[in-house]
Image: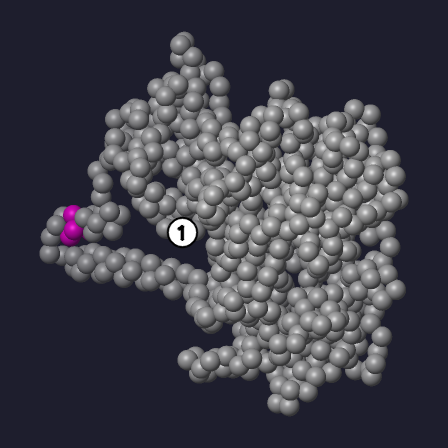
């Protein structure tokens, strides 16, 4: 057998695992180029070489390289094989690593080793036993024989105890809820008996439910009525009351409520943003922190209210004017010293701060995270657990507030953690979701469901089609990071366009098909910047901007400028002149320019589809009423109409609106949550296909976690 840690040759390439390098030799056998790869990439290559010429299954590679962690290893292995093929391409024009369908991978070039590096395949424990037996024979029947046997026994016992300990330290995940369409924001009562969480069924509104954890087979009890929406709650310190945001279905008003469980008595405390607004209680219920808004400006932010004073006014902690961030989530430390805050700087950048409650001073813990979903303090008040998404993969982390060092929990779908009182265990919402690009044939005589265009175990989203190039551009996490890719209208001939190794979002073709505009995080991770990719030169440029946050992008009809939303409203960025022009102060979500100088758009503050003439931006006209059109992002204009998503009771519907006839035509109904509220649509006129981002599947369950990193 081959030692995995030694050098070997593949054709003109020397593979050296000791420094994770590939050295390519010229015909003179001198070093011509050296490339350093990630350690895991080299480990995969060395393992395939050690098994040459056999086919090695994915499961076997994951077991040896990633210790059997299928969640991490599956995507990491695909990423490793992709990179190895790229880096080994100088050896041969033919593939070096073969994918054997439904079997695994095989190295196609025989590795060359030094004869000194070939050893017998003997188990470590057997080696120890063999040495001890040799020693026993040499010493014959002396008293050392007894000692040797004892050594063998101790080694064997230690070996098994060690591996038993490793098994015992593996994460223990158990399910606490079943049956709901989406079970969210779990929290356990201080005595550990009761679980409260938000849930809904068949696309109906969220309500709060209470489950008795001492009687696991008992059915959960609904706490709130059909007349309102509730999804997340926190417990009072004595476990007798709940605090939660609640939205009245009829009026749309949102209030933070105090709910006494024994009597079902409810008291309104303060206004909030929505029924999913984050909130938390300080120790001993002295203070409530929540995401609300200023009554005069309707500007969302973080507020606290003193619960020890009757009718105490809320105190705003977030800035009110000239803000470059939005506070979105929060959590008190168990000793009451700190308030952790999840703060978003742009629509794709978010980070964690902790605020000293006594002094008001803030400390930044992270830089350049993507999407934080939940914060919870460890009982030692020195560590914080949080959930974040990296290139479409959601995971949990625990961070030390002193060193700012974080470690991954490696729990798939980890979201909204909440520690049990005086415990190292926590409950969390397990959210599993993947996206795929689908197409819907709009000219079919018989209506059919959307068909997947790209199929694999990775996420594909945000498609945009170019009539000029006959190709789509989209975002995929195939390489381990969200990057831009392109494919033809059949999803074939795929090609990677960017290698930024960070989250890119919302690509948009220019009308002439020569450029692609997209968003990516800025250098500080505190916002996003507009990138322009030129397809001919493969050059990448960044538009100069005084803003740190930009909305979805749209090209002017002559491709000379980009329209997007900023803090000042609808803004135009000129490509050649490096000028920035504010068109209107209206807060736009998505816009589409027409060839007659108009701009069709949706607004953040009002429903309906709107239009403006670019030479008369002060005149705004609603062209589809709010009763018909309430979508913000999932719509696209085609010829004399537009396709858009509409939400119904327990379903979603794709509609077509005819501008001339002012008539609505239903196209197809889909299950609720099929299309994300932050998705996108595009249309191929030639193929008469509507392209969309579909949620491949979505699960939200309440789970309990015990983990060695939480001890």
- Residue 422 position by quadrant: bottom right
- Residue 319 position by quadrant: bottom right
The location of residue 477, given as percent across then percent down, is: 52, 41
Is 133 in the magenta? yes
The location of residue 309, given as percent across then percent down, is: 82, 82
Residues in magenta, as a range: 132-136
Of residue 121 and residue 107, the one placed in the foreground of this image is: 107
Residue at the spot x=62%, y=47% of the render?
A: 656
User: Can residue 384 be seen in this snapshot?
Assistant: no
Query: Considering the image in quadrants, where does the N terminus appear?
Result: top left
User: Can residue 53 be seen in this snapshot?
Assistant: yes
Instruction: Identify whether 668 is placed above or below 191.
Output: above
Q: What element carries label 1?
A: loop
Instruction: Identify whether 449 is placed above or below 87.
Output: below
Of residue 320 and residue 439, the one placed in the foreground of this image is: 439
Residue at far left of view: 141
Q: Name the residue under label 1.
A: 69
The dominant secondary structure in magenta is: helix
Instruction: Identify whether 403 is placed above or below 423.
Output: above
Of residue 290 and residue 123, the one placed in the foreground of this image is: 290
Residue at far bottom of view: 263
Residue at the spot x=73%, y=83% of the render?
A: 267
- Residue 691 position by quadrant: top right
């Amino acid at each position: 057998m081959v030692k995995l840690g030694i050098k070997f040759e593949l054709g003109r390439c020397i593979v050296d695992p000791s420094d994770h390098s590939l050295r390519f030799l010229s015909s003179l056998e001198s070093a011509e180029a050296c490339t350093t790869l990630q350690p895991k990439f080299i480990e995969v290559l060395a393992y395939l070489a050690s098994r040459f010429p056999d086919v090695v299954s994915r499961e076997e590679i994951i077991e040896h390289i990633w210790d059997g962690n299928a969640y991490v290893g599956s995507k990491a292995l695909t990423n490793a094989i992709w990179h190895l093929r790229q880096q080994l391409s100088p050896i041969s024009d033919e593939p070096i690593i073969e994918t054997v369908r439904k079997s695994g991978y095989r190295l196609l070039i025989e590795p060359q080793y030094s004869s000194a590096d070939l050893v017998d395949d003997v188990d470590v424990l057997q080696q120890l036993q063999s040495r001890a037996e040799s020693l026993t024979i040499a010493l014959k029947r002396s008293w050392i024989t007894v000692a040797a046997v004892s050594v063998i026994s101790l080694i064997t016992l230690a070996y098994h105890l060690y591996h038993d300990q490793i098994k015992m330290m593996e994460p223990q995940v158990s399910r606490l809820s079943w049956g709901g369409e989406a079970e969210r924001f779990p929290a356990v009562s201080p005595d550990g008996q009761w679980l409260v969480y938000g849930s809904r069924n068949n696309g109906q509104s969220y309500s709060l439910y209470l489950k008795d954890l001492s009687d696991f087979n008992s059915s959960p009890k609904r706490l709130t009525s059909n007349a309102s929406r509730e999804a997340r709650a926190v417990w009072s310190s004595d476990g007798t009351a709940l605090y939660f945001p609640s939205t009245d279905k009829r009026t749309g008003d949102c209030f933070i409520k105090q709910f006494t469980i024994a009597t079902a008595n409810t008291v309104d405390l303060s206004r909030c943003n929505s029924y999913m607004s984050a909130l938390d209680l300080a120790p001993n219920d002295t203070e409530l922190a929540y995401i609300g808004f200023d009554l005069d400006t309707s500007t969302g932010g973080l507020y606290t209210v003193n619960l020890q004073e009757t009718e105490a006014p809320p105190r705003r902690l977030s800035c009110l004017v000239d803000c470059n961030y939005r506070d979105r989530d929060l959590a008190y430390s168990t000793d009451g010293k700190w308030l952790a805050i999840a703060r978003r700087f742009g629509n794709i950048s978010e980070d964690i701060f902790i605020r000293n409650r006594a002094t008001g001073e803030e400390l930044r813990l992270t830089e350049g995270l993507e999407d934080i979903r939940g914060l919870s303090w460890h009982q030692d008040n020195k560590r914080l657990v949080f959930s974040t998404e990296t290139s479409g993969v959601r995971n949990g982390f625990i961070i030390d507030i002193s060193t700012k060092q974080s470690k991954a929990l490696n729990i798939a779908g980890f979201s909204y953690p909440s520690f049990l009182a005086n415990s190292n265990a926590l409950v969390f919402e397990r959210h599993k979701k993947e996206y795929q690009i689908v197409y819907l044939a709009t000219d079919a005589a018989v209506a059919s469901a959307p068909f997947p265009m790209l199929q694999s175990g990775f996420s594909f989203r945000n498609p945009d089609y170019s009539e000029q190039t006959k190709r789509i551009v989209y975002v995929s996490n195939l390489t381990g990071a969200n990057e831009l890719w392109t494919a033809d209208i059949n999803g074939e001939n795929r090609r990677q366009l960017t290698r930024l190794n960070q989250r890119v979002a919302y690509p948009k073709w220019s009308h002439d098909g020569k450029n692609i505009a997209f968003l990516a995080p800025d250098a500080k991770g505190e916002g996003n910047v507009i990138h322009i990719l030129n397809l001919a030169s493969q050059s990448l440029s960044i538009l100069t901007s005084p803003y740190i946050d930009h909305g979805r992008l749209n090209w002017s009809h002559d491709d000379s400028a980009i329209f997007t939303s900023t803090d000042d409203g609808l803004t135009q960025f000129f490509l050649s002149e490096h000028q920035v022009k504010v068109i209107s102060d209206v807060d736009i979500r998505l816009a589409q320019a027409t060839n007659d100088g108009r701009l069709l758009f949706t607004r953040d503050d009002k429903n309906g589809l709107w239009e403006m003439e670019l030479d008369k931006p002060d005149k705004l006209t609603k062209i589809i009423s709010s009763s018909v059109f309430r979508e913000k992002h999932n719509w696209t204009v085609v010829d004399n109409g537009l396709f858009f998503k509409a939400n119904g009771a327990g379903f979603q519907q794709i509609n077509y609106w005819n501008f001339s006839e002012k008539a609505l035509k239903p196209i197809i109904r889909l299950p609720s949550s099929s299309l994300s509220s932050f998705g996108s649509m595009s249309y191929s006129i030639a193929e008469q296909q509507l392209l969309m981002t579909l949620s491949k599947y979505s699960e939200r369950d309440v789970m309990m976690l015990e983990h060695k990193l939480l001890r």
